[in-house]
Image (spheres, helix red, strand yellow):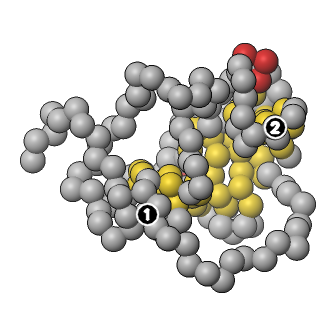
């Protein structure tokens, strides 16, 4: 197996596993300078941990995000603890129709859910590290942009009009 290739291997669908794990680098030109990765119409699947297994995450860093399957809540590492993120319950229903598979990335695993653009496995006790940025330094933000603000040690979301602190 040639591991010196500079070409990333991208998984096109959920039924085909990439032949090896690779590192995907940033492109030299980005269409929108406000974000590095646009998930488009796909979804992000966070690494999952039980509440008891969260302590096994190697070297947690501020801005890491995971999904706690014990409490069914996302958790954000704020530099001192894994803070649960709460939301407002909605009346939105779950679609019963199947979504067509979308191309995407499977990280630390050989498969992904057909609806995920980016799916990250918790294998190896790793979490997802959000971009760390001060919102005032992000030019031309787009709705849906998220980052970890080191000044407030919290998750921020741009809603298309203003930056919101997520709790």
> SS at mark 1?
loop
Left or right: where does residue 137 sit relative to residue 86?
left
Find numbered disc 2 in the image and state the secondary structure of the residue it sits on. Answer: loop
- On the image, which quarter does residue 92 sit in? bottom right
Where is residue 28 drawn, in percent x and y? Answer: 40, 22
Left or right: 149 as drawn, with respect to 127: right
Residue reaching furthest to the top: 137
Residue pointed to by mark 2: 160
List x then y, in percent, for residue 64.
63, 40
Residue displayed at 36% across by 37% down: 24
The residue wearing badge 1 is 112
Query: Is residue 80 visible in this depiction of the protein?
Result: no
Residue 111 falls in image quadrant: bottom left
Sequence-earlier tag: 2 or 1: 1
- Residue 84 in the image: x percent, y percent? 78, 52
Can residue 77 be seen here?
yes
Expressed as whole percent of the image width and height from the top left, the position of residue 79 reads: 71, 32
Using the numbered discs, state the Cα–Cα distance from disc 2 to disc 1 in whole angstroms.
Answer: 29 Å
| Residue positioned 41% across, 28% down in the render | 27
The answer to whether 58 is drawn above or below residue 15 in the figure is above
Along the line of sight, the residue nearer the viewer: 16 or 133: 16
Q: Residue at x 65, y 67 (%)?
A: 69
């Amino acid at each position: 197996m040639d591991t010196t290739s500079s070409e990333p291997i991208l998984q096109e669908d959920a039924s085909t596993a990439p032949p090896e794990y690779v590192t995907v680098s940033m492109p030299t030109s980005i269409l929108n300078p406000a974000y590095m990765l646009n998930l488009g119409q796909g979804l992000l699947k966070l690494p999952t941990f039980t509440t008891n297994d969260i302590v096994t995450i190697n070297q947690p860093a501020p801005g890491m995000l995971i999904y706690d399957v014990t409490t069914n809540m996302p958790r954000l590492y704020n530099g001192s603890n894994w803070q649960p993120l709460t939301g407002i319950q909605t009346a939105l229903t779950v679609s019963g129709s199947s979504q067509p598979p979308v191309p995407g990335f499977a990280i630390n695993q050989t498969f992904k859910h057909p609806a995920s653009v980016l799916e990250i496995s918790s294998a190896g006790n790793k979490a997802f590290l959000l971009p760390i940025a001060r919102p005032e330094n992000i030019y031309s933000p787009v709705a849906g942009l998220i980052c970890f603000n080191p000044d407030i040690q919290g998750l921020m979301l741009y809603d298309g009009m203003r930056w919101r602190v997520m709790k």
